[in-house]
Image (tube, grey):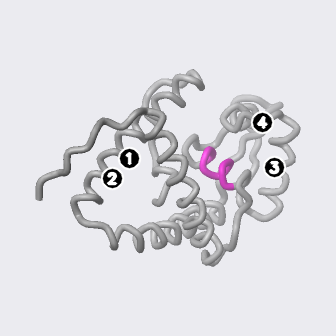
Amino acid sequence: MPRSIRPPVSRDEAAHTLDAVSELLELLWGRGQESAPSGPVPPSQLRALIVIEQGGSMNLRSLGDALASRPSSVSRLCDRMEAVGLIRRVPSSTSRREVEVGLSPLGEQVLRELRDHRAREVRAVLEQMSSADVARLTEGLEAFRATALDQLEERSGRSGRASGPATGTG
């Protein structure tokens, strides 16, 4: 089936479309999060879990930098996450004055469950699309993801591609 010929889309139009789609994804993901056995996780904790998962054990300063949060806010966030068992704190192996945070087994499980349930919600939409549309969507999203990761790495001063699972649907 030949692709329809469309006029080029401006970057502004693409940004508005992506914004609208991201709002729909948030709604779908919210439904997925509500149905996950572990229940809903506040957005700030979810962001922190994903950053810790991607970065491995890290000190509070590194976590704060990645979250663009103040040290006192990061410390309180970690207090709440440790209290419910999502992370673990251990003394740093390189500095006696620092503490490192890492995902606990429960934190890893919560991320897995959340991604599984989010993926089910998104998959239900994808099943209604043609295979060609799904292929084009995937190609575009992979290009967007690669560019976004490069931009985030440039801003944070890190080099090399982030490894680990995507922060989307699993």
Disc 1 element: helix
Residue type marked 4: Ser
Residue 9, above or below 29: above
Residues at marks 3 and 1 touching, judged by CB atoms closer than 8 Å:
no
Q: Nearer the viewer, mark 3 or mark 1?
A: 1
Residues at marks 3 and 4 touching, judged by CB atoms closer than 8 Å:
yes
- The residue under the point 17% across, 51% down is 3
Residues at marks 3 and 2 touching, judged by CB atoms closer than 8 Å:
no
Mark with earlier residue (3, 4): 4
Classify 10 Å Cα crowding around label 2: few (below 14), some (14-19), many (20 and above): few
Residues at marks 2 and 1 touching, judged by CB atoms closer than 8 Å:
yes
Mark with earlier residue (3, 2): 3
- Looking at the image, which is closer to me, 25 or 2? 2
- The residue under the point 76% across, 37% down is 60
Mark with earlier residue (3, 1): 3
Residues at marks 1 and 4 touching, judged by CB atoms closer than 8 Å:
no
Give the residue at mark 3.
Answer: 77
Classify 10 Å Cα crowding around label 4: few (below 14), some (14-19), many (20 and above): few
Q: Nearer the viewer, mark 1 or mark 4?
A: 1
Distance from Cα at disc 3 to Cα at disc 4: 10 Å
Residue 68, quarter of the rendered image:
top right
Residues at marks 2 and 4 touching, judged by CB atoms closer than 8 Å:
no
Q: Position of residue 25 (x, y in %)?
A: 53, 60
Q: Nearer the viewer, mark 3 or mark 4?
A: 4
Q: Position of residue 24 (x, y in %)?
A: 54, 60
Classify 10 Å Cα crowding around label 3: few (below 14), some (14-19), many (20 and above): some
Q: What's the magenta region?
A: 46-52
Give the residue at mark 1.
Answer: 141
- Looking at the image, which is closer to me, 61 or 22? 22
Residue type marked 2: Leu
Distance from Cα at disc 1 to Cα at disc 4: 28 Å
Distance from Cα at disc 2 to Cα at disc 4: 33 Å
